[in-house]
Image: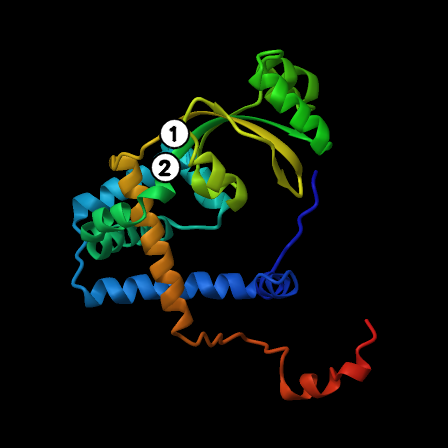
Amino acid sequence: MSNTLNISNKEIIYYIKLSGQVPTLLEAIATRKIISDTAAKEGIKIETEELQQAADNLRLANKLLKAEDTWVWLEKHHLSLDDFEEIALANLLSTKLANHLFTDKIEHFFYANQLDYTGAVTYEVIFDDEDLALEIFYALQEGEISFQEIARQYIQNPEIRRAGGYQGIRPRSDFRPEIAAVVFAATPPQILKPIITPKGAHIIVVEEIIKPQLDEQLRLKIMGDLFTNWLKQQITTVEIVAKLAEDTNSQSSKNMLTQDELHV
């Protein structure tokens, strides 16, 4: 028979303090309040059918396929059915507010920042020795060796080695600035002369530059980015005052913790 360990609300709050999670939680609570207050100010309404769909989406996201799964999940997270509905409502309100504020701004933002969404299909090998990298680059240029051969010989990571140094489709933001400048100026297919960074000498093959298309997936990403940045900006305009039961940062405590007295 297992022992029972009782944990009180006070102990939970105390642990949150000691683990340094209070600032993050306060910001999350403030963000929630900002969304709720702004949605009310903008006259955003929630229909019953929308809330039901949001609840279904929440169940699906957490793989709660049966009623029993939902009850187990609620118990694990110490939530009631009302709490579950509140989570679904918060998710829906956030989505509707983001749409309300930024749907008509997506196209302008996309075309103004189109280069940031351009992708590059690349292969890469990184060398510690710059002279060796340059020697291999010229051998590649002359057709004396293939990129697959140098990938097999010089890439340590087994998965990347088996893929021949393939890096996938990467946006400009995934590259170091000095690498991005050369990669996105390339004329594919092109082998780039070794680029020197703190990681070493990079030999990169640019196979393709992919022009971005403003499809639904990218629309959602842009809207999400705009909404996240807006929320961060809103947070900077408010002063968050937490009403905790026990304020360990009392004046008497502060007086005790002068620089000369801190020996921990």
Write down the quadrant of residue 236 in the picture.
Answer: bottom left
For marks 1 and 2, give the CA distance. 7 Å
Q: Residue 106 — which label? A: none
Write down the quadrant of residue 30 in the picture.
Answer: bottom left
Please tell me whether mark 1 sits on a helix, a strand or a loop.
strand
What percent of the width, then of the height, locates residue 242? Answer: 49, 74
Q: Work out which residue is located at the far right of the displayed protein and give it.
A: 263
Mark 2: amino acid: Thr
- Local packing at callout 1 (Cα closer than 10 Å; few below 14, some 14-19, many 20+) is many
Quadrant containing the N terminus is top right
What percent of the width, then of the height, locates residue 64? Answer: 39, 34
Please tell me whether mark 2 sits on a helix, a strand or a loop.
loop
Q: Nearer the viewer, residue 236 or 198?
A: 198
Residue found at x 33% / y 66%: 34
Residue located beneath label 1 in the image: 209
Q: Nearer the viewer, residue 207 or 38?
A: 207
Q: Nearer the viewer, residue 68 or 137?
A: 137
What percent of the width, then of the height, locates residue 104? Answer: 18, 52
Mark 1: amino acid: Ile
Pointer 1 and pointer 2: residues touching (CB < 8 Å)? yes
Could one spot residue 176 in this view of the protein? no
User: Is 184 situated above or below 177?
Assistant: above
Residue located beneath label 2 in the image: 118
Residue found at x 74% / y 85%: 256
- Local packing at callout 2 (Cα closer than 10 Å; few below 14, some 14-19, many 20+) is some
Residue found at x 57% / y 30%: 193
Quadrant containing the C terminus is bottom right
Q: Nearer the viewer, residue 53 or 126?
A: 126
